[in-house]
Structure formats: structure tokens, C-alpha cells
Image: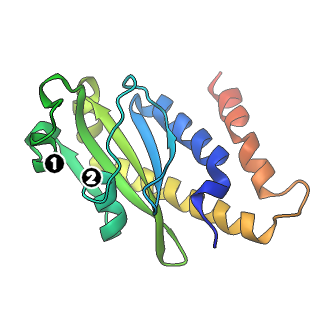
Amino acid sequence: IMSLKMISDIATQLAQMIARLLSVDVMVVDSNLERISNTYRIGEVLYPVKRDSNVGQVIQTGQPLIIDRAKNYPACMVCPGRNSCSVDGFIGVPIFFHDTVVGAIALIVPVICTVKIFSNTKNIVAFLEQAASLLSEVIGMADKHENCGLDILTLCRMLPGAVAATDS
């Protein structure tokens, strides 16, 4: 069965690009609740990955989850690090492959970015859904083109260089 773990390098590159673009932490988690990628932009905060965590809820329901002002959210209210936490929000979307949730991509939003990110959640969610769709396509291509030379996976691996070139 195809999984996010197979394309972890591409998932990590995509997460890093999104993190740089939005100044947030980005996490990609598979349906087994295994962290595939985490950018750790908000320090080494190990955001929980459990069935009842925010990202677990996205994977279980197959629905986006938006949490603005996390400290008022039930799961955050019982967290022992609540008072010193620099995380103020969460936006997660599921990653589907053939109508099955294979994981989630999530933004962990620091306090300093709350206004910027949550003033535009509709577009942020649409952007994340496109990123999730891209990861799904890459999983499918990895399945079809495992033994090819220069294929879509190679092109995806070149993507960060292309983005960096257009940025400068």
C-alpha cells in the first residue's frame, strides 16, 4: 500500500517551503500517526500526535480543522505547558489517496502570526488542500513510476531549487 513515508523527502521539502512562506511550523503526519515531517520553526515544541490530538482529529474525521486562539480549545486547556506555550492556532487538512485518508498536513501557528494567518483562513485552507492534493499525486506517481529515470518524482525533488530561483 502506498504511503506518505515513501515520499517523506518530498513531504519535508513541501513542508519547509510552506513554513518559510507563512512563518509557521508545518507538520505532515501519516494515518498511523507517525510524524513524516516537522519543520520545528517554533523551537523544538513537540506538538502532540495522538488519536485525540488536533492532527489526529483531522485524520479520523477526514475534515479540515481550524483552531484560532488555541488556549481556549479543550485539548489545549488540559495541556500542562499551556501557560508557556507559544502556539496560538492550528489549521489542518487531510491528505487523501483514492478516497482514503492517508495523513494530514497541519500548520502550527505561533502567537506572532495569529492575526496574519487567521484573517485569511479560507485561502489558507484552500492552499493546504492543494498541497495535500500534490502529495497525493506524488504518492500515485511513486506507485506508477517506481523504476523510471527522470519522472515526476525527480521533478518534484527539483521543485525547491526552482522556487528559490524564482524568489531571488
Regarding residue 13, the answer to whether it shows in the image is: yes
Q: Is 47 rendered above or below residue 127?
A: above
Q: Is 17 rendered above or below residue 35?
A: above
Q: Is residue 128 rendered to the left or right of residue 79? A: right
- Looking at the rendered structure, the number of numbered marks drawn on it comes to 2
Residue 72 placed where, x, y %?
8, 41
Q: Is 147 rendered above or below residue 18?
A: below
Q: Residue at x 65, y 21 (%)?
A: 168
Q: Is residue 4 rendered to the left or right of residue 102? A: right
| Label 2 residue SS | loop
Q: Is residue 86 rendered to the left or right of residue 18? A: left
Which residue matches tag 2? Answer: 53
Which of the two residues, 80 or 96, is positioned nearer the viewer here? 80
Q: Are marks 2 and 1 in contact (CB under 8 Å)?
A: yes
- Sequence-wise, which precedes: disc 2 or disc 1? 2
Which amino acid type is shown beneath numbered disc 2? Ser
Residue 84 placed where, x, y %?
17, 22
| Label 1 residue SS | helix
Quarter of the rendering containing residue 43: top left
The extreme bottom residue here reads 99
Q: For marks 2 and 1, give the CA distance.
A: 7 Å
Q: Is residue 139 rendered to the left or right of residue 128? A: right
Which amino acid type is shown beneath numbered disc 1? Ala
Q: Residue at x 44, y 29 (%)?
A: 40
Q: Residue at x 15, y 33 (%)?
A: 80
Quarter of the rendering containing residue 25: top left
Which residue matches tag 1? Answer: 75
Q: Residue at x 47, y 33 (%)?
A: 19
Regarding residue 122, the answer to whether it shows in the image is: no
Q: Is disc 2 surrounded by few (<14), some (14 to 19) or many (20+) residues within 10 Å?
A: some
